[in-house]
Image (cartoon, rainbow, N blue to C red):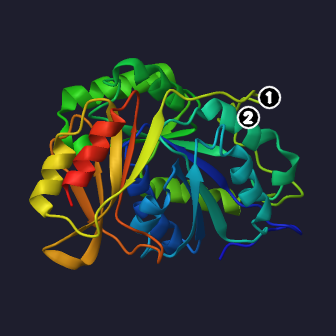
Amino acid sequence: MYTSRAHLPMIPLVLMAGFLGAGKTRFLSEIIPALGQRGLRSRVILNDFQNANIDAARLGQLDALVTPLNGECVCCGSLRELLQTLYDIPAESGSVMLIEANGATETDELLGHLSTDGRLKHFTLPLQLTVVDAARWQKRWWHNALERAQVATATHVYLNWTERLGAPRQALVGKQLGEVNARAARVTPESFADVLADTLRAPGASADAGIRREDAALPRTSVAPHRHPFASLVLALPESVDRSAFLRFVQTLPEAVVRAKGLVRFRDTPGAMFVWHRVPGRQTVRLDRSWPHDDANPTALFIGVAMPIADLQGAVDALG
């Protein structure tokens, strides 16, 4: 373990941002083991619309302290709960705090709170890691501005899903990211784990001295509450469903659903539970075996704008 050089150790604080479906939880599943290899303990706060237990289930086997934070975006409706969670975390050496914000978070406002709150003195000033879906970068219609804004405040950027792209598309995305934010360093889970380890090794890495990253350029503004354009809906799935019927259901969701995910059990494998998720523009439904909390039940979570709630409820009922 790395130890502080003064009385009270500071915990590196990382805000993880990225549009819906960019791959933030996937990044977490890779960086947590990488931090462990460097002798660092991961603390994780997962924020999501109404049911953060879904993503917490995906991290169930990793050596991390995971706190689900259900509700609205941590930049507005769930901000108080987020801050209280951070206040309650003890100052300890050799740990890292990772906050996975949901995909609709406006990072500039949240960074303002994390940077100015005097009760967070046991944390470093925040770094922001933004995960970018290279295949869908700036292909989100009226949500393009939010995606750019999440990059504009980043100190570090991880370009995800590049294996799906040719060299010209990768070059174009890289060029556009540089135009939005030329300061952000491009990282991988491994290299970002090195960044956090180096932060803890830095001289004065304690609450007595404080740490400021010169490349952060974080806003320090007071922000009024606001409403997001996104809405969410959580529906209970049957205890088990036919696999083929469920996959058809997910693949034919209406375009108004920006993001869909949840927990599901199939009749052909009744003893297993899976995290499922789908992002518009992708034909397949991803299934990941999960080890959920004891109170986790089969669930469908939908995020979008002007969603046809009655139609979604009817489609879920038909799965029974």
Q: Which residue is mark 1?
A: 222
Q: What residue type is disc 2 on?
A: Gly
Q: What residue type is disc 1 on?
A: Ser
Position in image of residue 163 (x %, y %): 21, 45
- Above or below, 125 against 178 in this view is below
- Is disc 2 placed on a helix, strand or loop? helix
- Above or below, 165 against 125 in this view is above
> Which quadrant would the N terminus be assigned to in this image?
bottom right
- Is 8 left or right of 264, judged from the image as shown? right
Q: Name the N-terminal-most of marks 2 and 1.
A: 2
- Is 68 left or right of 9, judged from the image as shown? left
Task: Check disc 2: other Cα within 10 Å, few if <14, some if 14-19, many if 20+.
Answer: some
> Which quadrant would the C terminus be assigned to in this image?
bottom left
Residue that appears at 26% across and 34% down = 135
- Is disc 1 placed on a helix, strand or loop? loop
- Above or below, 203 against 8 in this view is above
Of 146 and 135, nearer the camera is 146
Cα–Cα gap, marks 2 and 1: 7 Å
Asked if residue 279 can be seen in this view, the reply is no
Q: Which residue is mark 2?
A: 112
Answer whether labels 2 and 1 touch (C-beta < 8 Å).
yes
Of 31 and 101, nearer the camera is 101
